[in-house]
Image (cartoon, rainbow, N blue to C red):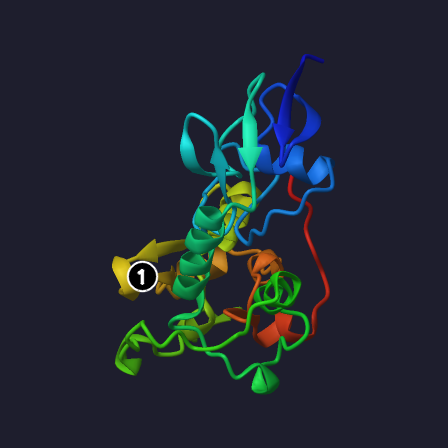
Amino acid sequence: MQQVELTIDEKPVKAKAGAKILEAASAAEIYIPNLCYIPEAELPYGGCRLCYVHVEGRGLVTACTLPVQNGMKVHTQTPEVIRVRRTAYKLLIAYHNLDCRACWKNKKCDLQKLAAKVKVKLKRPEDFRELPTEFLPLDTTNPYITYDPIQCIICGKCVWVCSQLHGEPLLDFAYRGNKTRLTLSQDASLVEEKCPSCGQCAAVCPTAALRPQGPLACDDRSAEVG
């Protein structure tokens, strides 16, 4: 298998051709924060923006989307990288319910774990305006999954896994900007016909945005992504 040679934070790294910077860094035990990365995805989403790095000659790029190249020089901890990551992090938690102690996923939440790893506080950014709560109602229209939009970070993992497993995703995003939210099928007959109640959308959710209800609430079944 063809390999390319690059440096990440001055460390010589070898990676297979076509690998993303994030994958090369991970293999070299260099940590780059991320929440939306899916190794199996052919087209990375790059939505969380936490994996920004600086590539000499190219500037800031998301490490989960850019393939490695011979001679590439990557820097993961420059002041500019840290600044844009903090901004990206603020965007993720700006409208997020930060009452972790009352959350059913407390201590199992990837956002919480990432905050601890990069040593940042889960605290509401003072320079972001609050989103009116009328835009964030709890969605219980799906018989299997409850969606809590104030816990959602729009990472796209649930949409991807549903599409990969079942071909016709019952999940998608609607609206734009700070009103963007996941939509669950409003057609009960479609859900009953198409949804196998595998629970994988909730399983890959990094926060408490998706929670099994009904038969799935006490079901530990899982499906493999092929």
Q: Left or right of 117: which side holds 121?
A: left
User: Which residue type carries mark 1?
Assistant: Thr
Q: Residue at x 56, y 51 (%)?
A: 34
Element type at mark 1: loop
Q: Is residue 170 visible?
A: no
Rendered position, 109 above or below 154: below
Q: Nearer the viewer, residue 142 or 133?
A: 133
Extreme residue in the bottom direction: 102
Q: Is residue 11 visible?
A: yes
Percent coordinates x, y for residue 178 in the rendering:
29, 64
Q: How many marks?
A: 1
Q: Left or right of 85: which side holds 109?
A: right
Percent coordinates x, y for residue 209 in the rendering:
50, 69
Which quadrant is the N terminus positioned in?
top right
Q: Nearer the viewer, residue 78 or 124?
A: 78
Percent coordinates x, y for residue 131 in the rendering:
29, 76
Q: Left or right of 20: which side holds 142?
A: left
Q: Residue at x 46, y 78 (%)?
A: 97
Which quadrant is the C terminus positioned in?
top right
Residue 7 location, quadrant:
top right
Percent coordinates x, y for residue 32 in the rendering:
60, 47
Q: Residue at x 64, y 77 (%)?
A: 106
Rendered position, 63 above or below 196: above
Extreme residue in the top direction: 2
Rendered position, 149 above or below 133: above
Q: Residues within 10 Å of mark 1 (few under 14, many from 20)?
A: some
Rendered position, 105 above or below 187: below
Identify the residue under disc 1. Answer: 180
